[in-house]
Image (cartoon, rainbow, N blue to C red):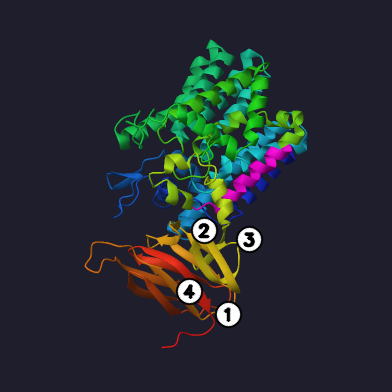
Amino acid sequence: MNTATASWVAPLACLISFVVLVANGRAIGSGDTNAVERTAAALAGQGTFVLPEDAAQDPFTRPTAGGRISIYPPLPALLAMPVFFLFSLVFDLNPAGQQIAGKLSAALVAAGAVALLARSYASRSTSFRALVSALLFGLGTSVYSTAQALWQHPAALFFLVAAICGLERMETLPKALRWRPGLIVALGLSLSAAARPAAIPMNTVLFLFLLHRTGPGAFLRLCAIALVPAGFVSVYNTHFFGAPWLFGPGVQGRFLSAFPESIAGLLASPGRGVLVFTPIALLALWQLVNTARRSNLARGLLCAVTVHILFIATWNEWHGGESFGPRLLTDMLPALFFFMPEALAAWPRAGAGLGVISVAIQLLGGWTYDYRWERLHQRGREFESALWSWPDAPLAFAVREGVLIQGTPSVEGRRVRLQLRRSVPFGTEGSLIEATPSGLRIGGSALVHDVRLERGARMRDGRITLTHPGDALAFRSRSARLRTVRIVGSTPRDSSPQGWAQTVLRLESRGRSTSLSVAGDFDLAIDLSLGGGEDAFVRAESGELRIARVSFGTEEVRP
């Protein structure tokens, strides 16, 4: 090993990856991550896995004695607990504080996995190539997107990287001595599976490879140390879910309905394909296959990658639900990318091009993704077709909307939260917003900018349709002279005596809101005094709104 090189490549890769992971200033979580973050907060605050009872009855938790329990494994929360505890010394672990602490924890663990991999890379490559390879793993793949909140993946990745590095070290030793690093491998594989049960099939392949490479004399030692984490998981599952083999999420009836089409979806669909969201993975796979011709380790890793893809493909929700890119394939990335330095050495130009594209795609998600694509597609009947639609794929959708989201911390005493600012840097300024069959058309003098649709607001039949209180047509004042807004639109027809649905239109700005009841066609002129740079939102407080045109003026509405 080139110790001098590894001594600075690993910490530098860790630092760069951590800084980039948190640079967007926001947590991109879900109901899954919320349950894990609440568990970490309970461990840091009360020393218990049991969460307080809540009126909403979070579907990602189950009732248990004294409260509720997360359906997900406890290891990621345990790993994050020190960060949550230190955070709680300065700030409250309220929901916003839990999100921030969760993102910091995930980013630290993911950066640690990058550092371990960089150390391995530096032992067999130049320092620059080792650094670039490690950063491609951490910032050019779904390692980046799954480190935006406290998913299970960062913990599983960290332990799996440690295990594969141990396998690499074993290959340089006589067979009689391989059991020593083999203990680290066995423990790492078991911990990885404990953090992420979906990794069990893949890790089983690697454990069998470990046994084969060490021989029968090490069998009992390796199994004994692997059983330590497995034993804790068994006790936990028995206590909270009723049996050692039962995990929180239900699995009955959730396999094979999408197989084998799911294999193509995981690899190449514009909605979730790993080769679409991570083009550099093609080079990594090519190198892994080539290296497998002469390396036992590469053959073992290739088998593990294949098994993981096939296993995830059997899962009905192979697309990973609400997430950016192929989240469920994240766990195999250490095995897939283990020979990345060799790939970059063999194909430097292809590696540079695919690497830049891969990192750009992940950063695009980090600064644009907010589950809006899923609200428009996943919760509707067209989701399956949307996963295969190139014109309306998540990447094309993000570029077309052009909305960037930057978070900044806001601190009030012990309370901290992330304020999100949405902007449309390449959008058009104007004083008139019109809905057309081809999208929004903005024109006129420069009174507003950063015009955008938020949450589930959509274009339908040439109208901006708002159906949920969170849906919005949003804009930002360019001029302090802005005084009025005129909104023209309609509500849908219904079976009421007047024939039109009754809807409450709400116009919001900082510190002020106006609610007006409308039915049928309407043409409203509303006072709106905004300072330069202030946001305003048109929402449907109740019912459904169909907006045709919004215009702005500099004179107040006359009575």
Task: Residue type at mark 2: give it.
Answer: Gly
For residue 407, say whether it is visible: yes
Q: Residues within 10 Å of mark 3 (few under 14, many from 20)?
A: few
The answer to if 19 sits in the magenta stretch is: no
Q: Earlier in the sequence, mark 1 or mark 3?
A: 3
> Which type of secondary structure does the marked residue at label 1 adopt?
loop
Q: Residues within 10 Å of mark 2 (few under 14, many from 20)?
A: some
Residue matched to label 3: 426
Q: Which mark is residue 510?
A: 4
- Residue 476 vertical placement versus 343 (above, below): below
Residue matched to label 1: 480
Q: Where residue 143 sits: x, y (%)?
A: 57, 41
Q: Nearer the viewer, mark 2 or mark 3?
A: 2
The residue lying at 48 percent from left, 44 percent from top is: 323
Q: Disc 2 versus disc 1: distance between alpha carbons?
A: 27 Å
Task: Residue type at mark 1: give it.
Answer: Ala
Instruction: Say whether residue 228 is left or right of residue 276.
Output: left
- Residue 513 vertical placement versus 267 (above, below): below
- Give the extent of the magenta segment: 352-370
